[in-house]
Amino acid sequence: MDRALCIHGHFYQPPREDPWLGRILPEGSAAPAIHWNERICRESYAPMARARRQDGSGRIVELVNCYSLMSFNAGPTLMSWMARSAPDTYARILEADRDSLARLGHGNALAQIYHHVIMPLASPRDKQLEVRWAVDDFTARFKRAPEGMWLSETAVDTPTLETLADAGILFTILAPSQATAVSDDAKNWRDVDAGSLDIREPYAVRLPSGRSIAVFFYHGPLSQAVAFDHLLADGEQFFRRLSSAAGPGLLSLATDGETYGHHFKFGEMALAYALDQARSGRDGLTLTNYAAYLAANPPRRYVRIREVSAWSCAHGVERWRSDCGCTAGDHAGSYNQRWRAPLRNALDLLKSRLDAHYDTTGASLFNDAEKALVAYGGVLAGVVSKEAFEHVHMVPKTSPTQRGMAWKLLSMQAWGLASFASCAWFFDEISRLEPVNALTFALRAAELARATGMADPEPDVTAILAEALSNEPAMGTGRDIWNNLAKPRRETPKTLVTQALLTLALENRLPAGGHDATVFWPGVDVTIRLDDAASKGISGTAAILYRLETAADVFALTYTPTTAADPFAGCASIQPATGGPEQGFCFENVGLPVNKRQALADAFTRHAEAAFFADNLAQAAIARSLVTERQEAQQTITLAPLLLPLWPGLIWHEVFELPLAEKRRELLLLFLKNTGHDSPVKAALEARLAAETARLISRPDPDWQLLARLIAHAADLDLHPDWWAAQNALWERRPFTGSARELASALGFAV
């Protein structure tokens, strides 16, 4: 039997999108990145798509798409963000599955439970939705049906496996501690534990329905060693551990994708090395994936699973509903998790009421409310248009108001499910970002429920949350966190108009003279039209289009901009175009939460930096043209301290332009080198330089001489840009010949 190797990567980020705007807002703990999706993508997901494999001298010989050589699951909530915000990495992941499908007959990609809920704690309906929506999402992205599905935290029970099998899933992956007994004939059983279970083959689980599903068990100690024993510090060491553990049959590991690069810097390079060694057949190893191995080696034996269990909790699934002692965070031993039960109970109560409301209200709106809810996964996946969905699932001749209500009910259910993402209970404190996000999703679901006629559930929900005591005394209870951290995130026409006007002002895009400008978020657009100024302010309109619930509102607007430096000193008033009371407000009193105020600050930062750099370039071009020859013993430019603000622009021109005459360049370089070592804008300039280099390499007909000069000039000026994106762009232009070969050498490739 072959010595087969399969390394599985679990790639997941929880739902982070603001449930009104549909965009991930700034998360301060991820700074300087905007949020954790962005940060971990840059540190792990993107490098794994182009991992550097080096020769003995440290020069790059290959950019390895690790996803094409390993099994992986990428959760829908991560993939939907990546498709919008990291399209190159997203494309490489899809390409990897196609490549493995062509090579092995089965793709490397597995589906994953949609919202990463703990399945044994979910209701039968929610189990079905999490699986069916995940299948729809996977099929839309990878253009094939999934064969396997990753369970959140490998949390499993028999009803969960029944749900997988019912959806056509052939296998899942569990920890060896989740097996209790094995049998050759499903009659005579032998007890096993994590130490005695033979993990080298797949097993069959017989289900009460008469169906069966295959289960693979990963190598527990070796998977743990990758995460915690610094195996990724050296690729050769990693491969030798893999080879020594392999034997006849399948050796499989299950690892978090963030391990490679985020937890261990350059861990993706160690992974790429080990995968390449196995790809070459060293030590008789062969690379495979679970689906291909299952097709060639159907289960010969049966297994009984440990009911209601998960890999990351020694107490079943108590980590997600009680103070069991299993936790992660910075306060080991000093914080308790007694808040977990009230949080779970409050959300369970809300979800039960949402379900009952959906069934009652949806009965008159859908042909079959249950089928419509399951089919909503196609809309979420973008493969079913809203018009097509309405035609099939909504009662004929429903009014626009009724259709709007139906869409709100569906969105209500989706946000209700999102509130159960496992991260809300995983860590050590209820006021962390993850539980607050869960409460925000619940808040949105409750709001949609009220908008469709349900009695307000908030008093009963918050009464239970009041039982959840934060470990931080200043944070109070879960009810305080709901009121002080979640509720301020709620959007209203007033908050949306405030953010739209401030964004346009900060980006210098405020319209005038009857023109309009739009601020786009994935979930909502706000279009501002401003006419001429009047005595009471600038009149106009504000049109709000809600994309997630197919609704629109138009307001008469009066805008009074501020004359002070603080843009929040402005004011406005809105009145529904259909009639109703006028609301006047000043922006500083609207009460935007910190993440939305930070998003406005980020909008200003981007615009201000771009405007500053453009002006700096223009002024620096003049200053550079006026540089004189260096005189005897001269060490810097005259009035150098006054010229220092133009350092970024002077550097840029020096890198990209032809050199000045020798004596003039000598003087300019003295100034640039002596003043740039500790420049606070050096890192930003290096990042801009790296991005521009990658853009120039990607052009249809690159100027290779300019690019070679650019790299050389950057080195002369003691600049050290991260050439990662430039290397990626150049790798796509293989084979390297002529001037491209010289550039490849300068960028670190072995040529």
Image (cartoon, rainbow, N blue to C red):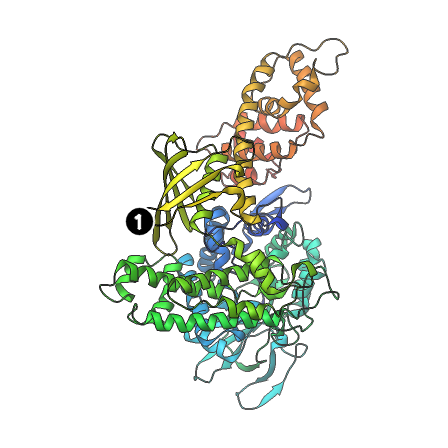
Closest to the observer, 272 or 476: 476
Q: Is residue 3 above or below residue 578?
A: below
Q: Is residue 246 above or below residue 276?
A: below
Residue 124, how many percent across, how many down? 45, 76
| Amino acid at the residue labelled 1 | Thr
User: Is 34 placed left or right of 575 in the picture?
Assistant: right
User: Is 484 placed left or right of 133 in the picture?
Assistant: right
Q: How many marks?
A: 1
Q: Is residue 239 above or below residue 698?
A: below
- What crowding class fits label 1: few (fewer than 14 Cα within 10 Å), some (14-19), or many (20 or more)? few
Closest to the observer, 621 or 91: 621
Q: Quadrant of residue 661?
A: top right
Residue 106 appears in the figure: no
Residue reaching furthest left?
397
Residue 419, how many percent across, how many down? 51, 64
Quarter containing the N terminus: bottom right
Q: Is residue 134 above or below residue 193?
A: above
Residue reaching furthest bottom?
188
Residue 738, how many percent across, how many down? 53, 30
